[in-house]
Every structure is written in C-alpha cells, then in structure tokens.
Image (tube, rainbow, N blue to C red):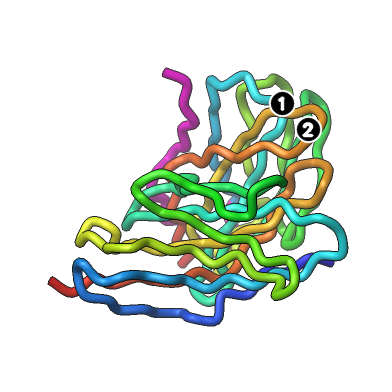
Amino acid sequence: AQSVTQPDIHITVSEGASLELRCNYSYGATPYLFWYVQSPGQGLQLLLKYFSGDTLVQGIKGFEAEFKRSQSSFNLRKPSVHWSDAAEYFCAVATGGGNKLTFGTGTQLKVEL
Amino acid sequence: DAEITQSPRHKITETGRQVTLACHQTWNHNNMFWYRQDLGHGLRLIHYSYGVQDTNKGEVSDGYSVSRSNTEDLPLTLESAASSQTSVYFCASSESGLGVFEQYFGPGTRLTVT
C-alpha cells in the first residue's frame, strides 16, 4: 500500500527566506504526486502536481517541487516566503486508477515577520 | 463558477444520535470523496463514489455510510455518533476517466460529538 511521510510537523521561517518542505512517498509503481495548501478554517487548494515528464514542476503562488525517483521524494520549495504563505501543507500520492489520494500528516508553516 | 459546498459548517451533536453531513458539487464530476482530518493523521479517506449508485469504503469507514442518488450530492451519515468521530470532515470531487485528476475540496464541516 502507498504511504506518504512528511517528517517536519512544524517549520518556522523568516519572511523573505527560502523554504523547503520535505515529502517522501512509498509506492510500487509510478507515483502521481500532489501538494495541497490549507489556510486556517479553509479547505485544501492544489499548489502543484506531478504526473510524468519534467521532474521540476511549477505551481501557483511561486511554489515549485522536484520529483526524485531515486530518493522517493517530492519536496516543495519557494525561494522567498511571504507572510501570507503561513498555512498547513499536505503532500499526497494517488494510485494509478480511481484518483484516491493518500495524504501525509502535514507540515504547519509559520512565517516570522 | 463551479464549486463544492458543505453544510452545515459547524455541528454539535450528542453521542448516539444520527448525523448527516451534506456535500454538493456543481462541477458535474463523477468522482466524490469524503475525508476526515485529525491532528497527527492528516486526511484519511472515509468513503468514495465513482458515480450514481456507486459507493465504496475507504480507510476509516466504520460507523459511516454514504449514498449517491445523483451526480451532485454525496451525503455522509454517522449512524450513531461517537466521541471518536469528533473531527473536521472534507468532501472532494474530481473528474473521471483515464488518468489521474486533481481533487477539488469543499470548505469542511467541523463536527463535535459530546
């Protein structure tokens, strides 16, 4: 069965600093990978997704993620964090059929001004 | 604009009562999903449906049921609410067909069972 690990429960960065959120997955076949963001009291919004092709994918709000098959990782990055990026971030993997998602436990991002 | 809505947004109920949470989407998506979100667990799949009259159990389905009588709605019923079902519940929908599609999420329902 597939699984997703987000090793960092909480991360604090200063505004303007770079950000990297870690995500490791376990899945036997080619993974379909997602990053979602959840602002307080809101639903989840898709940041970006990887299905195939270029291993560096660009998303909304200036985020990008790199798929590394050898490391089973799909880390999320942003070169310069804004205070509005404070939220919870979830990595997820989908099976090849049915679109069912398996989520990681999430990383809570705090941005210091 | 197409959207996915959930009601109520907040609900307090007593142990043993039956509770139904509504989910309505105007995307015309065949696939619909229910998740619960708990601290330290992320989101876990409760039930899902690939179309009218189709329902399937997810990872944490015990104590929950769903029915799909039309494309737009997938209500989630807690047959006899328990304190362990206090959680935030999210509904989602996605396109269907060959390949994998992103899921669109509703705003969530916060349920407290006392």
Q: Is residue B105 left or right of residue B93?
A: left
Measure the alpha-carbon separation of dots 2 and 1.
5 Å
Q: Which mark is residue A26?
A: none
Q: Earlier in the sequence, mark 2 or mark 1?
A: 1
Q: Is residue A88 left or right of residue B65?
A: left
Label 2 packing within 10 angstroms: few (<14), some (14-19), many (20+): many
The image position of residue B64, as x and y in percent, is 70, 52
The image position of residue B60, as x and y in percent, is 72, 62
Residue, disc 2? B50
> For residue B12: magenta?
yes
Quadrant containing the N terminus of chain B in the rendered view: top left
Task: Specify the amino acid type for callout 1.
Answer: Asn
Front in this rendered view, residue A38 or B12 = A38
Q: Chain of mark 1?
A: B
Q: Is residue B108 visible?
A: no
Q: Secondary structure at mark 2?
A: strand
A105 in relation to A103, above or below: below
Front in this rendered view, residue B100 or A68 = A68
Front in this rendered view, residue A88 or B41 = A88
Task: Specify the amino acid type for callout 2.
Answer: Tyr
Residue, disc 1? B30
The image position of residue B44, as x and y in percent, is 64, 61
> For residue B3: magenta?
yes
Mark 2–mark 1 contact, CB under 8 Å?
A: yes
Instruction: Give the residues drawn in magenta, as a range.
Output: B1-17
- Res. B46 image quadrant: bottom right
Residue positioned 63% across, 54% down in the render? A55
Q: Is residue B94 left or right of residue B112?
A: right
Same chain for the residues under marks 2 and 1 in the image: yes
Q: Chain of mark 2?
A: B
- Res. B84 image quadrant: bottom right
